[in-house]
Image (cartoon, rainbow, N blue to C red):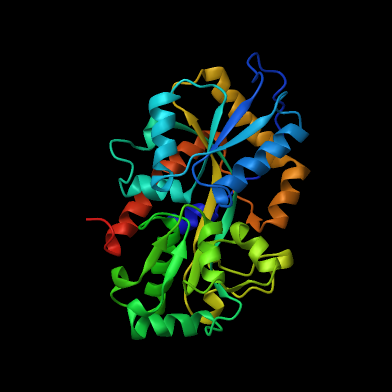
């Protein structure tokens, strides 16, 4: 099933990328399918920095933000306008496979791009503003069960996307009914959604731990549940899980990349191995720890299969909770 597959991982081996005949020249572009401030933006900017530190690229890695349609604008741009671009990487995650599973990218599917690799997983959270009347997940879900329309959630994915699904997974596990009636407000990125919650316009935020770090550290956002099997390590260890509150809800979100389908085979090999090298580096492990990422890195020859399987699993889940016919 989805969760079990997502939680499995294989340690990466360091791979030299200097031996390849093809290497990127000049500027490499990393496309973040959202505005600045969300998880895809974090993926591009942090990976770009480490690639430059490790000299995986000789030039710069430029993050280009392209918001719209829950990642659909960037996916369509890659497929239709950049189909053979050797120097384009696009940030992806479980949110991407969710939209593909729900056929939200009209006329497109997972086989239209090349899936490069994953660099860790980001656990889902449910959080409220510092002055919220809800002290824990049970109080929030009791309000949802009493009146599904009484609690408004905000997230950085489109309606029906992965952030929305995490709310429904938690609500279903808590025993709530009429799941489609729960209000969910979609924003272009997690940062914008959190601003609405901090400002009191929305009751709760649904997103990932890496998105919320800044708002948590400032004290403006209070995480009432991490959607993980057990508490996260390090500075996040004081955050309660949904499970320990009696709500069996888990929602991990892998982070990685795809690239154009018709890029050269040498370029594809180069970027797959570049991701392997980056994942094995101490520089990347430091970023993972500081941003709450957990190890998740399927072997290169298994990642495309993993993506296809996850698309199918999310399609099944979406049908079960009424988001897909």
Decide if residue 195 is on the left or right side of residue 111.
right
Quadrant placement of the C terminus: bottom left
Measured from the top left, where is residue 250 in percent x and y?
49, 65
Measured from the top left, where is residue 198 in percent x and y?
57, 70
Q: Is residue 187 above or below residue 20?
A: below
Identify which residue is drawn at 52% across, 70% down: 197
Measured from the top left, where is residue 225 in percent x and y?
55, 73
Decide if residue 76 is on the left or right side of residue 276.
left
Q: Is residue 134 above or below residue 38?
A: below
Q: Quadrant of residue 237?
A: bottom right
Q: Is residue 107 above or below residue 289?
A: above
Identify which residue is drawn at 56% across, 58% down: 191
Report the front residue among 244 and 143: 143
Measured from the top left, where is residue 273 in percent x and y?
63, 29
Identify which residue is drawn at 28% across, 59% down: 323
Residue 13 in view of the camera: no
Report the front residue among 269 and 226: 226
Q: Is residue 48 above or below residue 123?
A: above
Residue 122 in view of the camera: yes
Question: Which residue is the extreme one toward the left?
Answer: 325
Q: Quadrant of residue 19?
A: top right
């Amino acid at each position: 099933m989805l969760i079990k597959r997502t939680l499995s991982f294989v340690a990466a081996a360091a791979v030299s990328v200097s031996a390849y005949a093809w290497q990127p020249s000049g500027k490499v572009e990393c496309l973040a399918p959202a505005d600045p401030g969300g998880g895809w933006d974090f993926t591009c900017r942090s990976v770009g920095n480490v690639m430059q530190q490790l000299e995986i690229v000789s030039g710069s890695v430029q993050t280009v933000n392209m918001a719209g349609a829950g990642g659909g604008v960037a996916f369509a741009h890659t497929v239709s306008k950049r189909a053979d671009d050797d120097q384009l990487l696009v940030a992806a995650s479980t949110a991407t496979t969710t939209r593909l599973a729900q056929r939200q990218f009209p006329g497109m599917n997972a086989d239209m791009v090349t899936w490069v690799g994953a660099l860790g997983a980001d656990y889902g959270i449910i959080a409220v503003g510092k002055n919220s009347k809800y002290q824990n997940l049970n109080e929030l879900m009791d309000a949802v069960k009493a009146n599904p329309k009484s609690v408004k959630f905000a997230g950085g994915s489109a309606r029906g996307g992965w952030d929305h699904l995490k709310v429904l997974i938690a609500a279903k596990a808590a025993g709530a009914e009429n799941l489609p009636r729960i209000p969910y407000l979609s924003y272009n990125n997690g940062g914008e959604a959190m601003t609405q919650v901090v400002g009191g316009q929305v009751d709760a935020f649904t997103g990932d731990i890496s998105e919320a770090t800044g708002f948590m550290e400032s004290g403006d956002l209070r995480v009432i549940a991490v959607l993980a099997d057990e508490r996260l390590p390090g500075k996040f260890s004081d955050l309660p899980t949904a499970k320990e509150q009696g709500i069996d809800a888990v929602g991990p979100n892998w982070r990685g990349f795809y690239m154009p389908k018709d890029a050269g085979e040498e370029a594809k090999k180069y970027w797959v191995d570049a991701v392997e090298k980056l994942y094995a580096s101490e520089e990347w492990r430091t970023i993972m720890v500081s941003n709450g990422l957990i190890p998740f890195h399927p072997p290169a020859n298994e990642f495309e299969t993993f993506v296809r399987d996850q698309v199918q699993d999310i399609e099944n889940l979406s049908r079960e909770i009424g988001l897909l016919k």
